[in-house]
Image (cartoon, helix red, strand yellow):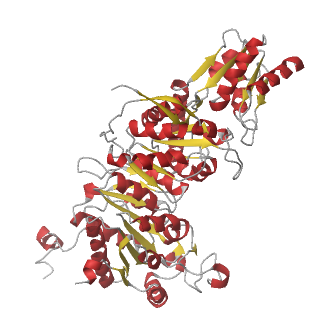
Amino acid sequence: MAEATGIKDIIKPENLVYKKTGIMTDNVLSYCPGCGHGTTHRILAEIIEEEGLQSQTIGICPVGCSVLLYNFLDIDWQEAAHGRAPALATAVKRLLPDRFVFTYQGDGDLAAIGTAETIHACNRGENILIIFINNGIYGMTGGQMAPTTIPGMKSSTSPYGRDVKLMGNPLKMTDIVATLPGTYYVTRQSVHTPANVRKTKKAMKKAVQYQKLDKGTCFVEIVSNCPSNWKMTPVESNKWMEENMFPYYPLGDLKVPEEQTNK
Amino acid sequence: MEKELRLMKGNEAVAEAAIRAGADGYFGYPITPQSEILEYLMQAKPYTTTGMVVLQAESEVAAINMVYGGAACGKKVMTSSSSPGISLKQEGITYIAGAELPCLIVNVVRGGPGLGTIQPAQSDYFQAVKGGGHGDYHLIVLAPASVQEMADFVGLSFDLAFKYRNPVMMLSDGAIGQMMEKVWLSPQKERSKTVPEWATTGKPATRKRNIITSLDLDPNAQELFNKKLTDKYNEIREKEVRFEEFQCEDAEYLFVAYGTSARVCQKAVQLCRIAGIKAGLLRPVTLFPFPSKRINELADKMKLMISVEMSAGQMVEDVLLSVNGKVPVFHFGRMGGIVTAPDEVVEFLKSKIIGG
């Protein structure tokens, strides 16, 4: 058998079941093993390719682990100051109303320093997509407490666990923006299992398609992990996320377009 | 088309000139004494005529970052504010300088520090010409001294901003922003349809992706970029110095003053001449680049120089550097929102002549 079919006989276009999307570049991802960023990037890249949006897309990068995101997707990019991505996106979309404009932000960027920009962009109903990666920690700076760090969770600036009396409560930004009249579609997903990856892709695809309707801001939160700063293996971190993050940040749609609910 | 004569406030002139210069977007936040700019634009609704976007942001921070986003698309975009608001914009301004984006920032200066006062001052000179935010960078800084220049410098600012891919600041003050004068307005220009090759407008198959960023984690690459910026600033120093001289030909005493103080000094020169004192005025029109070479030349024939500014003495440092010890240099000016009176300037000069 081994002699009959060599590896060269198998690697043929007709046997191809999986390949890198054209939108992903060949640059090596700068993320730690097991991190959800890479998976989320790929989902986004696939959607941009499938929707034929490469020439229409302007992405806004955050400050945080995904600060170098512009190296990984082959589209036009703007690098924002920490937390300011929704302000950039606002202007881009208003000046180029026929383009697809999105921001990609972590929890420190979106829910701490950029709280005002996030809420006001959503409240104005800017026709942009905001992708929000929530792993409850500042990853790039080495594991400090984030606005989304859950009660009791340890970080380098909450070494005994987040004491809400001392440090305040985690901020549920996705719940907040879902209450604003300017948002059109708000959902919370994860990318830690194949099933969740498929759900996230479906949700994000909807969000991208909704942009064409000019009906308001779409907001997709990805509850994610941070094996390095949580000091866990990737497998442990996913289990910890399921057991501790999901009860606090339950997955699912928070706001769906009225036209969809009426059906 | 012909020019149109109107009676306007300086702030209104900026707004009208922006529409006529074919600006693509204005992003602002109310603050005294410059709120008329946003109010005028909202009233004029240029989005229904030229297509210019006008948006009231949630903060000065958001407004300058909207300017970043718009500028990164290759659009002619601007913001305006007054001193405390400009402090808030400094983060965005350094990112804009670091990403080499063209834009216009108008500062209608009021007295500080802190909330200070809402009255005119020139105490933001350092912040405007020395960078303002973190890192090594410069803005091109224009100092209008009339309502006419408030209008004229808008188009000039956009031209310079795009020529050098550098943010330009119009450093005005509450007096010029609020006072009314007649102003000749240029005819309406069409908004540009040209897309700069570096602009992020969506990547077509025909070019590589455009990335607008100020980040480079490689120290060697970052230093090269710093050197590139330095070369650019040196080129600007070489080519873009603008100033005006008033009765300098036979002058023995020189006032150096910009904006409102320059108008005060123009009167002071006339008063001096009546009193038989040979005074002259050099008015820097660009504060960066500073007319250092000319001031140094003039120092050869002056007995002394006075930097007249409504501040505790900021531009005087650049006058001192320009003069390089050739003649004594003094600072004079009122603060706290008080506009210096011409006779105060004359008296100060007389005291220095007698004292010297």
Side of B130 where A149 appears, left or right: left
> Which of the image's four quarters has the N terminus of chain B?
top left
Side of B134 where B323 appears, left or right: right
Rendered position, A72 above or below A247: above
Looking at the image, which residue is at 42% across and 68% down? Answer: A122
Image location of residue B37, percent across then percent down = 50, 45
Q: Which of A258 and A117 is in front in this view?
A: A258
Looking at the image, can residue B69 be seen?
no
> Which of the image's four quarters has the C terminus of chain B?
top right
Rendered position, B293 above or below B314: above
Q: Nearer the viewer, residue B182 or A87?
A: B182
Looking at the image, can residue A43 be seen?
yes
Name the quadrant containing residue A50. bottom left
Image location of residue B148, percent across then percent down = 51, 29
Image location of residue A243, percent across then percent down = 46, 91
Hey, which residue is sitting farthest top in the picture?
B250
Picture mark count: 0
Q: Which of B270 and A169 is in front in this view?
A: B270
Looking at the image, which residue is at 54% across and 58% down? Answer: B59
Q: Nearer the viewer, residue A173 or A49?
A: A173
Name the quadrant containing residue A151. bottom right
Hey, which residue is sitting farthest front in the picture?
B7
Name the quadrant containing residue A170. bottom right
Side of B237 where B200 appears, left or right: left
Rendered position, A51 above or below B334: below
Looking at the image, which residue is at 48% across and 57% down? Answer: B57
Image location of residue A36, percent across then percent down = 40, 75
